[in-house]
Image (cartoon, rainbow, N blue to C red):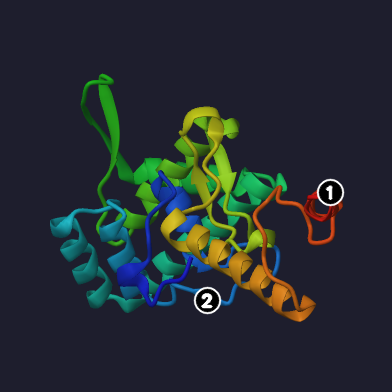
Amino acid sequence: MVAEGITDLPLVAGHPVLDLVNTVEPRGEEPPERDHLVSPHNLLVWAGRAGVVDAAEAARVGAAWSADPGKGDRALDAVRDLREMVYGVLRRGASADPLLGWWRDALGRAELVPAKAPVEVVARGDATLITDRLVLAAADLLTTLDRAALSECPLAEGGCGWLFLDHSRNHSRRWCAMADCGARAKARRLTERRRAVRSGGGTARRPGAPAPGGAAERRASGARRDT
């Protein structure tokens, strides 16, 4: 996946916490080339796009961070720590123990409100709103996730390593986005085939077609001589 900035970073994971994990690229064992969450402003913009906060809530969070910039910096650090913890749990089998303390803190600032469930835990504090909602969402994800549905855009094949939920039949979705990583990988394979043909001095042939000079061609040549 290639994105110019936080305002056009694709949200393709199927869950906001996985979209959080995907705010670096490429995602893998090596240090990423780019981190899209480098400031509280980036976090605020991303949270609005990902549906973590609505416009009115984003305005309140932004005002709280402007009044005390340290709160914005702490929120950014906490969210980035959460991001790496979730990735470690999902891809490396790391411990989720750090989440327990964050989850308790978030619950301490949350409220129970009437809902269909019949009650819902709702984070309220402005300065910590984004952090708390992501922590609660991460706890829900890690305790309910169907691991068979979790997929990774294949880094070794030209993908970006992003995680996503694959709800397709037989879990056949291969790329985070076919129009992005899938299309670029397809174009790269085509270029490599053409380069191989040029370096070999031959021409490309259809899959399954006989090679020049093969048995089928020799039989056809013999038939022509006999006529």
The quadrant where residue 42 appears: bottom left
Q: For the residue labelled by badge 2, is the local secondary structure a helix, a strand or a loop?
A: strand
Classify mark 2: residues with Cα within 10 Å, few (<14), some (14-19) or many (20+): some
Q: Which mark is residue 219?
A: 1
Q: Is residue 125 left or right of residue 35?
A: left
Task: Report the amino acid beneath label 2.
Answer: Arg
Q: Position of residue 118 (x, y in %)?
A: 25, 19
Instruction: Please give the count of numbered marks on the rendered protein.
Output: 2
The quadrant where residue 36 appears: bottom left
6 is higher (above) or lower (below) than 145: below
Task: Report the amino acid beneath label 1.
Answer: Arg
The residue at the point 44 percent across, 76 percent down is 38
Question: Looking at this view, is 5 or 54 the one in front?
Answer: 5
Question: Looking at this view, is 167 or 131 the one in front?
Answer: 167
Q: Position of residue 91 (x, y in %)?
A: 66, 48
79 is higher (above) or lower (below) than 222: below
The residue at the point 71 percent across, 47 percent down is 208
CB contact under 8 Å: marks 1 and 2: no
176 is higher (above) or lower (below) than 141: below
Q: Nearer the viewer, mark 1 or mark 2?
A: 1
Q: Which mark is residue 79?
A: none
Q: Which residue is mark 2?
A: 34
The furthest residue to the left: 56
The residue at the point 35 percent across, 71 percent down is 6
Chain-order first, disc 1 or disc 2: 2
The quadrant where residue 70 appears: bottom left
Q: Position of residue 195 (x, y in %)?
A: 68, 77
Q: Position of residue 24 (x, y in %)?
A: 52, 67
The furthest residue to the front: 227
Q: CA distance from mark 1 to mark 2?
A: 58 Å
The residue at the point 76 percent across, 79 percent down is 201
